[in-house]
Image (cartoon, coloured by chain):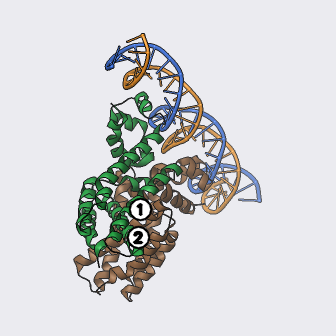
Chain colours: A green, B brown, C blue, D orange
Amino acid sequence: MSRETHLPALFQLFRQQGYDGVSLANIAQATGLGKASLYHHFPGGKDEMVLATLGYAGDWLELNVLEPLGEDGDARELLEEMCDRLSQLYDEGRQPCILGTLTLGPVRDDLHEVVKQGLARFIEAIAQLLIKAGLDQRLAQERSEDAVVMIQGSLLVSRGLDDPTPFQRAMAQLPEKLCAGI
Amino acid sequence: MSRETHLPALFQLFRQQGYDGVSLANIAQATGLGKASLYHHFPGGKDEMVLATLGYAGDWLELNVLEPLGEDGDARELLEEMCDRLSQLYDEGRQPCILGTLTLGPVRDDLHEVVKQGLARFIEAIAQLLIKAGLDQRLAQERSEDAVVMIQGSLLVSRGLDDPTPFQRAMAQLPEKLCAGI
DNA sequence: AGTTCAGTACCGAACGATCGGTACAAAACA
DNA sequence: TGTTTTGTACCGATCGTTCGGTACTGAACT
């Protein structure tokens, strides 16, 4: 059992409960490992666990969501595919985004920096696509920011209202909103 | 010193750090009270503290933001005024929304219910205005949901990126987006 | 008037429980 | 054999909470 084996379990915990909401006892139970084993795989303790989890989530996002945006093809279709992948990642709006969960809550400077880079990378990847599709650079930047705002906001509202439809509607509208006028 | 005296301090703590991120030691320091004194004002403990804080914030929102939406006047102007009040509440995007902060993080069922009602009330108040302005009921409901999505999402992104401009841009665009076609 | 007395506001000290983290030796595997 | 992995027991610190008690107040009683 390598440490990667248990990252999905950590991912579920941290995205749903945040840093402070997850205790080592929770992690031990979710992974089936004892505390000693956890500290064997993550000598840096809880901080290393959440950082590794963010890395795991970032890799998944990069590979399955952002990288396909760079392929050749119609911008609209690429964005629709992105929304499909996001719907999968967030389980149709029933699961929160780990970036959002960790953004709110107390400010841990090292964590905050990683989250910041993640959000910025997300925005940048969408902007690149829009620019390649012919959009003005400034407008592309604004629209991609709006996209992440819609994603994070709709996830939050969906969770707050206990109703995934705001997220689902956002995903349905996103490609059109981003491509308008192209 | 009544308990209301200390609610603003609690509000600042909980909106920024969430439920788990705030300890009674933090609250004691922020209010200048001893931990035992806190239990004099809030016999129900931390749960009562956060609930009272949500009530305080809800009252402020209702009085200063939602109630003015019901007054007579041009819908566009009323919404612009609402955005001004919201900018004040969120300090131009530099302060998070307590509803968002408490939405993410571990699920505390009683808290979740209060937050849910708060979000729903917010959406409903905007929808009422749009309906009165002549918008179809279904469209009004969707647009007001989108409004709260934009508010919460832009606040989250602003905080995540350490840059208040996404929120400020959202506030500038909101009235136009809501009133389009009226 | 002086005294009692209930009520409010507050606090230091301590409670049991849990927090994140560590030491170490047995077990499992190579 | 040596190395990796784990269970157990433990640590100091902090968690939310409670206890016993002090200081002050304004009304009630003598």
Q: Which residue is mark 1?
A: B99
1 and 2 marks in contact (CB < 8 Å): no
Query: Helix, strand or loop at disc 1?
Result: helix
**In the image, is A127 to the left or to the right of B45?**
left
Q: CA distance from mark 1 to mark 2?
A: 28 Å
How crowded pointer 2 is (Cα within 10 Å; few <14, some 14-19, many 20+) is rated as: many
- Image x and y of residue B92, in percent: 51, 71
Q: Quadrant of residue A94?
A: bottom left
How crowded pointer 1 is (Cα within 10 Å; few <14, some 14-19, many 20+) is rated as: many
The amino acid type, in three-letter code, at marker 1 is Leu
Q: Which residue is mark 2?
A: A141
Chain under disc 1: B
* Residue at x 41%, y 86% (from the top left corner): B77
Q: Quadrant of residue A179?
A: bottom left
Asked if residue A88 can be seen in this view, the reply is: yes
- Image x and y of residue B27, in percent: 56, 52
Placement of the N terminus of chain B among the 4 image quadrants = bottom right
Chain under disc 2: A
C23 relative to B173, above or below: above
- Of residues B158 and B149, the one nearer the viewer is B158
- Of residues A37 and D24, the one nearer the viewer is A37
Q: Residue furthest bottom?
A: B73
- Image x and y of residue C8, in percent: 58, 57
1 or 2: mark nearer the eye? 2
* Residue at x 24%, y 65% (from the top left corner): A73
* Residue at x 31%, y 79% (from the top left corner): B128
On residue B75, which mark appears?
none
Q: Residue furthest front?
A: A72
The amino acid type, in three-letter code, at marker 2 is Gln
- Image x and y of residue A97, in percent: 35, 55
B105 relative to A164, above or below: above
